[in-house]
Every structure is written in C-alpha cells, then in structure tokens.
Image (tube, grey):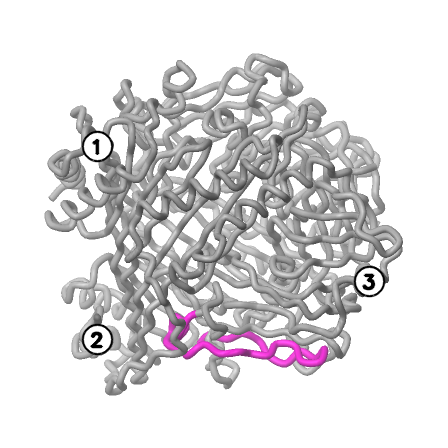
Amino acid sequence: MTLVDPELAGRVLQCALARGGDMAELYAESRRGFGLSLDDGRVERPQSGRERGACVRVVHGDSTYYGYVDGLAEENLLRVAGSVSEAVRGDARQPAALQAAQSGTRHAISTPPEEVEAARKADLLRACDERARAAGAEVAQARIGYAESHRQVEIFGSDGRAAADDRTRIRLSAQVVARRDGRVETGTDTRGGHAGWELLEDNPEHVAGEAARRALTALDAVDAPTGRLPVVVGNGFGGVLLHEAVGHGLEADAIQKDASVYAGRLGEQVADPFVTAYDDGSRANAWGSEGVDDEGTPTHRTTVIEDGRLTSYLYDLLRARKDGVESTGNGRRESFRHLPVPRMTNTFFAPGDATPEDLIGGVERGLYAVSFGGGQVEPATGDFVFGVSEGYLIENGKVTSPVRGATLVGNGLEALRAIDGIAGDLEIATGYCGKGGQTVPAGVGQPHVRLRQLTVGGTAG
Amino acid sequence: MSLEGAARRAVEAAVSAGASDADAWAEESTSRRIRVYSGEVESLSDAGGRGIGIRAFAGARSGYAYGTDLTDEGVADLARAAREAAELADEDEHEGLPEELGTADVHGLASPGFADWTTERKVELALAVERAARAREGVTQVENAVYSDSDGSVALANSRGFAASYSVTNAWAYASAFAGEGADLMTGLGVGMGRDPSELDPDAIGAEAADRALALVGARQPSSRRCPVVLDAFVAASFVGFIGSMLSADAVQRGRSLFADKEGEEVADPALRLADDGTDPDGPSTAPFDGEGAPTRRNALIEDGRLLGFLYDSRTARRAGRSTTGNASRGSYRSPPAVGTTNLVVEGGDRDLDGLLAQAGDGLCVTEVAGLHSGVNPVSGTFSVGAVGRLVENGELAGPVREMTIAGDLVSMLNAVRSVGSDPRWVPFGGSVKAVPILVGEMAISGS
C-alpha cells in the first residue's frame, strides 16, 4: 500500500521549493497502535489508535523550515508545502525526478500482531500476572503492559530520493512490587523487538517471573556502598552505560555545536585496544532497528569505536552534508510531527574474550550492577548518572549481598578509559530514548563489562 | 464543524455502536517552534493538528480509541474500535463517567494579545534570548535558544449531556548556555513561560542560562558528607513533582505510594505547604474542567505539616468513597483520562535564596539533578540522584561541585525541611510547578 502517490509527492516538493531552498522533503506516515495493561489483577486500559500525517521541510543554507499536518489528502499536503515555502526568500527551484522507492533491510515478521486475536493478548497478561504472583507470597502487586505498533513511512526528497519502510514493533513489560513488613521493593523486565507476535511465543511469562525475582531479591538488599569502587556492569540493559556515557556524545548535532566531549577526537585512542563498539540499525529484528531511517537512508552497522580508537560519529543527512560525509542512517524522528535528528539505533559493545566470572573474580571489593532503571547524560560535559535497579556487592571475587539505592555517577571519557575487561555474552535490551522532546525506541546492549573505578552514590553512611 | 460538535457526534457514534456510556475529547491546535543558533534561524516550524479520543463504556468496562480522522466515517470507525476494546477489559465496578460535571470559573487562558505577534517578531525574541546569553563574559557557547508556542482549543462531550470547550494559549522560551572549556565546561539552562510572548523576558532568560553555567565553571567532585542542602527552585520543583505523583489516589490504591497510610498524619515540616491548583490563572495546566468533565479546583495537599488528602478522578473517588478532586488528567487525545496533578503550588516563605544560604551555614546548594526517574523508589521513597551545584560556606556560595549524588528518603527529607524560600515562580520541571527554593536540614552527599 502506498501512502502518497509519487506524482503527488513530486508536486508537493515543487510547491515546497516555490521560493527556493537547497532541499525539500516530504515525510508521510501512517501508524496504528494497540495496547492494554493489567494492574491490580485486572485487565484494563485497552486502547487503539490510528494516525496519518505528513511533514514537509525545506532546508535553506543552515536553516530548516518545516510544517506538519494531520491527514494525507492532497489539499493538506499542498497547503503545508505552500506555507513552509513562504519562509524562504529566493527563486523557485525544480526538484529532481523521483527515483523508484527503495527500502532497506527487511525485518521478517512471521505473525503480524494485528492478526492475533485481541483476547489472546489479554490472556497473555493474565498468565504473566499469575507467573509473577507464583514467584513468592511476598509479591504484592504486578503491572503488566503489552503494546504493538505498525508504522508505514514514505520519504521523498527533492534530490530524487524516494524510500519506504514498514515497521512492526511489539513489547511486553512487567513491573512487580514485593512487600515484607514495612519494606517495599520493585523489579522490572521487558521483552521487545522490531518483530511480530512470534517474539512472545516462547515463554513470555518469563518477563514477569524475572521482574518478580528482582523485586524479591531486593527485599534482602542492604544499603549500597558509597565512594569510588570497581564496578562490573551486567549484559543487556547494562548497555545504557554505553548509550549515555558515549553514544549521545557521538551524535553529530552535538559534535557540530561543540556540545560534546567527543568533538575533535576522531582517531584518538579513547579506550583500551580491546574495546570496540557499534551502532547497528540493521541488526535483525532488534528493538532499535529500521529498514531505512526517517530520511530514507538504509540502516547499517557503524563502528564507532574500533580497537579503542574513536572511528565515527552518528549522522543524519543535514549534519553529514555539513561535514562532507555520508549519512550513517541515524536520521530518526518520533513521528511526522518532528524533525529528524541524529539518534542512536541499537548501540552496543562488541563481545570480548573474558567471562563474567573472570571479571567478577578479579574484584576484591566492588559493585555488580546487573541492570539499570535508567540514566541521563549531559553530552557537553560527558557527566552521566545511572540508577542501578539490580545490584550486588562483590567481595573477594564473589557476588554477595544484593544492594539497593545505588547510583553511578561519572564522566563518559573517564568511564571509557576505565574499562578493563569485556566478556563474550552480548545481549540487546529494549530502551526508550528521549532527546529534544522526541522519544524513539533504542536498543541498548553489551556483554558484561568491568570498570576499574566509578563513583557509586549509595544510601549507606 | 465545531470542535464541540465533533465531540458530540463521536459520543453519539459510540452510543450507536452499543456503548452504555461514552465521552469524547477533541483537540485542535497550531504551534510554532523556532530554534536559533549563532544569530540565525536553525529551524522554524508552523504546524497544525487536530484529533479525537473516544472512551466507550460497556457497563463496568471501558475501552479507548483515538485518531486524526474527524470525518463522519473516521469517527464512526473509532467509536466502534473503542466499544470493541471495552470487551477486553475486566469489569471494574468503579468505572464510569463522573457524577459531578461542570466547569470552574477560570479566565484568561487564551491571551487576546497572542495573535498580534508575527513569526518575525517571535524569531527576534529567540535571537534576543541567544544574544543575552552570549553577552555574558565567560560564556563559550549557546547550544540552543528556542521559542515555542501553541494556541488551541479543547472540547469534551459525554453521554450524560455534558459538552464544553475552552481555548488556551501558551508561550515558552529557553536557552542552554556553556561556560568554561574542555574538561571544565559546564552548562546552564534559562527558562521563561507565559500566556503570550509579551510575558517572556528574553534578557532574563538568556542571562539566567549564562549565569547558571558560569556559576559552575571549575566544578570538582566534593568529598562525601552529610550537611544542610538548599535545593534551588528548579531542583525543588523536580522533587515536588515527584511527591505530587505519589499523592495520586491511583498510586495510593494500587499500593505504589509511600503516602498510602498517611492521610491526616504529619508528613512534613510545617514550613512546607503544598497544593494542587487547577484554577490558578497563571498555571500552565489550568483549565475549567478536567479530562472527564469534572470542574477543576484548588486542593490543599500539605498544610501544618499534615497530609490533608489525595488527588482523585471519578473512578478512584468511587473506590475510596470520596468525591472527585477534578484531577482526571489527559496528556492529549491520545490517552484516556488518568489521575494526575494539574499545577502544583508551593506556598512561598519569607526568606530569599540568600537568606536560605545564610541559614544553611555550611552545606551545599544544588542547582541541577539528574536521574530522578531511575533514582527514586516511589514506594519506599529512598532516592539517590546525580547532582551539580555549589558548596555553601559561612552562609555564602563557595566552590562549584559535580559528579556527586544526593541521597536520602523522601519522608525524612520532608520532615527535615527547615525553610521555604520566597519569590515563587512557574517552572516546567516536575510537571507544572510554582516553585521556591527549599532548605533541607541534612542530606547525604556522596562524592570522593
């Protein structure tokens, strides 16, 4: 199914360039979503949504003018193109003939979620609730969420660019509260991907079981230690470390405004030679993957750190043009209501030679941060903070008591240099990344990683 | 077709599709966003949108559907989808439309002066913000100066005969400035908000961004300590927003709030007085009715150190045997109503920031926190968040500090409040909060 006829797209671009501009683009989108949740033992908030709309932008020098509109009717598209064109003061330009639409990597969807009967989705939530409550008598509350989305996008550029993408995502999440006497702790887990219902066919209740295990474990937690300690970060969601401490600082918009500690450091040794990291929007069925990005550039794997050397920034078309390089396929937008900006897709450290046991065994006293509740960075300074959602003490090379309330603070460049071991157990988890008021799905991942020292802010002492 | 008419028609469609009751929330708005960099427009948008969300009840169950197609056919499709979705939900005897419907007497939400501002003047305003920030000596970069506004209308109709609408305008501007270089670079944010651009002071916004960054240049990691802490208005607002979310009756009833058993009890030092006010004429979230048609009002939350009550929508109110407080909140037409804060208002005290610093003696003044959402346990209230600020020595600001966390638990923190500052201001942190700086007697700082 096409959203906008290429002939109409051509006229919209022509209209957008009526008063000049270096580049015009039409981005059309249709999205359908469905979700429901279970809380307090009850299935609730079933909801579906359907939106169609388009964004027209005109780039003129270093300025971008854009407008968006709900609906894809011809009059809507021409009106928004006309209104955007008025911001430019120059002579009309003619767009290049549109090429045949290309699409990037296809992510195979075996069972489109919309073809699965809705009642099965409600039953899945009930099964998860049951699994969580079976984990222990101290489980007090479970909240399970299910969401699916189907986005179709089409992109037409005045440089002749034409591309389409069809994106299906599915996600199951669980948050479990455990209670003992006056003490209350929570545990969470998720499973998601650029995938269909098949992702949830094999033991989906595990997500609830895992969240329950985390909540129950936390009931025995002692206050987190404070001070500078060696830290082993777990695989999967532990990759938030790379995402925050490094990834945001590699996005070319921050680089070009000198608003990143990584600006001017391409080719520099920023970590030990055994450290390699990628951003890979083409990874099969991963949460942050697309076929093409939101400017029509096919997604692919970009090596951002190779053998400890900084090798690439992450680009969209605009910033790539400015630096005279090719886009790395990182021009992403939340929806047709936003401009594309350089964003990570799936960002992860390459697997190393060590085992998690090796990494932990080498620590006399430290912290094992299995998973994070989230994180935040100021790219300009590189200062970051992560909340540890599941953590343990490491004493004499062994994992001992669970700890609660640990927060890691540090600086991206220092943290990279502090990496002294990487294991082989790479895993990618599902995150949501917010930047400039836009939220996009982002895959975060890594194998187990050890840092010589990081500041742990705990609640003890 | 008027917006109210569209909402009415959607309700009729839902009832025709078999809903026992229904409501529909329709929105229409235009918005502008202007980002300038280095004296030039970096991006400028002028956009419009409209959409509708329909909530259909099937007895004690409810379902929701939203979309952007407001044609007869589109609305009928959504109404059917909402009615079908309701079949999936489990019964909840407390579900339903509110008994109390109506509108509060609220004026001045839409500024008549808003329309006088051309796009060119708004670009000028954004450029003035940037210039003001760059003008301060020591500022090395202004990463962003942004002006943004919206004017729109909202309409709500339901199957009990309620139909109402209102229009609202809002304008914001902010800037992010850098000071220092290399490893010493620090950032600062300046913000301003109002009903129309004339309420924004570009010089003050730019200067605030610059001053906040300059104050932090040369920051170092402090040693760990326990000491008095002054939270500036931005930081206090973030904490207040978190506390507000835990006063939602929904969080309380689902066992997710540390305030669950504390109604009527002492929860804070009497210096801290907090209300949720959906009718404050200056509040960004002010409206005559809430997300399901109950009139908004002012709800005192903490007075004389006691927790006076929680925030309810009609469903949580029925479950608790109370009345709605007008706190059914809608993020947009894309989400069904749920309990939420409107504008949180902290009553100001009589000391200004300098007065609080003097009272603190030796301690810390925090000007930024990070990681609040991952760093606070909403049930137990324990928290550990990243922080940036200045040391306080002999009652005055001293060396800047970074790479540290402040930790504690919210219950102890509320009880340890010693003073609340004067000069309340609206800030866009923690939701919509009218905030003042707060002095807390003791908190745990961890650094080196």
Q: Find the distance from the CA under tag 1 to the CA under tag 3.
A: 59 Å
Magenta stretch? A290-316
Mark 2 sits on what residue? A9
Name the residue located 64 percent from the left edge and 45 percent from the top edge.
Answer: B369
In terms of depth relative to the viewer, which is nearer, A267 or B43? A267
| Residues marked 1 and 3 touching at CB (< 8 Å) | no
Q: Residue drawn 32% across and 84% down?
A: A159
Residue type beneath disc 1:
Ala
Q: Depth-wise, is mark 2 or mark 3 nearer the camera? A: 3
SS class of the residue under badge 2?
helix
Corner quadrant of residue A216: top right
Report the disc number at residue B49: none
Q: Mark 2–mark 1 contact, CB under 8 Å? A: no
Locate residue A308, reporting x and y percent.
72, 77
Q: Which of A110 and B35 is in front in this view?
A: A110
Give the Cα distance between marks 2 and 3.
55 Å
Question: In the rendering, at what x and y percent does residue A61 appear?
Answer: 40, 77
For the residues labelled 2 and 3, say whether their Cβ atoms are less than 8 Å apart: no
Residue A309 in the image: state x and y as whole percent.
70, 80
Q: In this view, does B3 lie to the left or right of B298?
A: left
Which class describes the residues within 10 Å of circle 2: few (<14), some (14-19), or many (20+)?
Answer: many
Residue receiving disc 3 = A452
**Which comes before the other along the chain, label 2 or label 3?**
2
Which callout, 2 or 1, points to the residue nearer the camera? 1
In the rendering, which numbered label is found on residue B22?
Answer: 1
- Number of residues whose C-alpha sits closer than 10 Å to that of mark 1, classed few (under 14), some (14–19) or many (20 or more): many
Q: Relative to A87, is B388 above or below?
A: above
* Quarter occupied by the N terminus of chain B: top left
Residue at disc 3, secondary structure: strand
